[in-house]
């Protein structure tokens, strides 16, 4: 993360629930090496039986359509 976004502000992951499963997640923003602003986030969802689902995204600040699509995809996650 710091290699691509050296000035990224990434908060400590927080415990949460995603689709009723325990998870840790964080999101933030930062500039890439060219100075462009990106939003990013990640989550690890504990889906059971020792398995973890890893979710992550990055979206350019200038791409509002992509940011909206990312939100829909993350909200659609279902742990089985």
Image: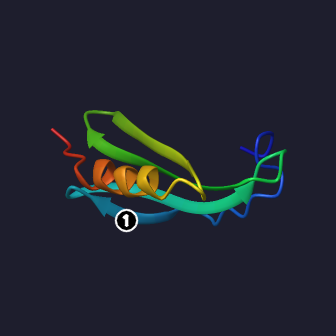
Question: Is 70 placed left or right of 21 in the picture?
Answer: right
Name the spot of residue 48 as percent of width and height, x first: 25, 39
Q: Which residue is mark 1?
A: 16
Q: Residue at 25% across / 33% down in the picture?
A: 49
Q: Residue at 29% across / 54% down in the picture?
A: 72
Q: Against 50, is 70 above or below?
A: below
Q: Residue at 39% across / 50% down in the picture?
A: 70
Q: Residue at 30% across / 47% down in the picture?
A: 73
Name the spot of residue 12 as percent of width and height, x first: 62, 64
Please, which residue is most extreme toward the left here?
A: 80
Observer-nearest residue: 20 or 4? Answer: 4
Name the spot of residue 14 as percent of width and height, x first: 49, 66
Q: Against 5, is 52 above or below?
A: above
Q: Against 38, is 78 above or below?
A: above
Observer-nearest residue: 68 or 6? Answer: 68
Question: Is 53 placed left or right of 12 in the picture?
Answer: left
Q: Secondary structure at mark 1?
A: strand
Quarter of the image with the C terminus in it:
top left
Q: How is the image coloured?
A: rainbow
Q: Residues within 10 Å of mark 1 (few under 14, many from 20)?
A: some
Observer-nearest residue: 47 or 7? Answer: 7
């Amino acid at each position: 993360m710091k290699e691509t976004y050296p000035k990224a502000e990434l908060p400590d992951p927080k415990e949460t629930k995603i689709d009723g499963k325990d998870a840790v997640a964080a999101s933030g923003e930062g500039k890439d090496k060219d100075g462009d602003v990106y939003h990013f986030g990640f989550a690890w969802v504990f889906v059971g039986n020792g398995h973890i689902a890893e979710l992550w995204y990055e979206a350019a600040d200038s791409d509002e359509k992509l940011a909206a699509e990312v939100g829909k995809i993350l909200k659609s996650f279902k742990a089985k």
